[in-house]
Image (cartoon, rainbow, N blue to C red):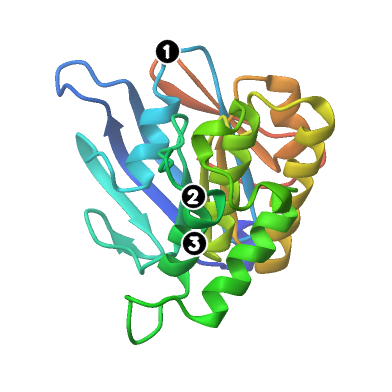
Amino acid sequence: MHSKDLKVNPSVYLEGVRIGYSKNNPLVDIPRLEIFPGEIVAITGPSGVGKTTLVRTIAGLIKPISGIVRVFGSELPFKPTRGSVGYIPQRLGLVRHASVLHNVMLGARAGHSGPSRIFPTQQSKNSALDAIERMDLSEKMYEPVRRLSGGQQRRVATARAISQSPQIILADEFLSELDDKTMEKVQTEVIDYVRRKSATLILVEHDVSRAKSIADRMLVIDDGRVNPFISQTTALEVL
């Protein structure tokens, strides 16, 4: 865990940020927010308050109405290093007619592209196969995604993200549609990745008890504000 005393540069930094789709009616005001390498942060709150919008803003998919958003020290809008940010959207964004392997290779090639982006490198192949195995999808490797269950498709999207070897993973309800046993497996693998790589995980999670069990820190969005909820086990200073 990181505190301000350690002088670690944040992976994500927001200052004076207003997010949403209308200048006259912003969803959320964020005076200041820092998220550090190796940290797992859960964003929770009622439906429709801006949780997904915040994640999409950090991903660079939506421009903030105002304020500064920096990722790895570079201010948005910018093009992050290829593969450095892994995104698991709520709607997954998979190529449904293509195989599990093809979908995961899309992520692996983004993070491990060689001099030629036409042909995959051995590193990208190995990364894809490792991610597929970690998500217990080896037996489904050549199966078209459209034939998989909703939970299996969510595991494909998670494998695609971690196969990039990203330094930030943005995950929107990535544990939904999973049974308890599979959820524990997926959660363990993703947390293990974050700890091993000193990566940052920012997840949207509607289940507060689950968010508490996963995250080092929780941010609760309500009434247009981001309110920190800090567990007794962490000494992080935020906002």
Inspect this view and state whether residue 194 appears.
Answer: no
Q: Earlier in the sequence, mark 2 or mark 1?
A: 2
| Residue 212 in the image, given as x and y percentages of width and height | 74, 30
Inspect this view and state whether residue 160 appears.
Answer: yes
Indicate the amino acid at tag 1: Asp
Q: Quarter-wise, where is residue 23 in the image?
A: top left
Q: Earlier in the sequence, mark 2 or mark 3?
A: 2
Q: Earlier in the sequence, mark 1 or mark 3?
A: 3
Q: SS of the residue at dot 2?
A: strand
Circle 1 or circle 3, nearest the eye:
3
Q: SS of the residue at dot 1?
A: loop
Single out the residue that lies furthest toward the bottom: 115
Circle 2 or circle 3, nearest the eye:
3
Q: Which mark is residue 223?
A: 1
Q: Which mark is residue 106?
A: none
Q: Which residue is mark 2?
A: 34
Badge 1, how many Cα within 10 Å: few under 14, some, many 20+? few
**What is the C-alpha distance between the residues marked 2 and 3?**
32 Å
Badge 2, how many Cα within 10 Å: few under 14, some, many 20+? some
| Residue 222 in the image, given as x and y percentages of width and height | 48, 16
Indicate the amino acid at tag 3: Met
**What is the C-alpha distance between the residues marked 1 and 3?**
40 Å
The residue located at (37%, 65%) in the rendering is 73
The residue located at (53%, 73%) in the rendering is 124
Most foreground residue, 167 or 117: 117
Q: SS of the residue at dot 3?
A: helix
**What is the C-alpha distance between the residues marked 2 and 1?**
21 Å
Q: Which residue is mark 3?
A: 105
From what the image shows, is residue 175 above or below residue 158?
Answer: above
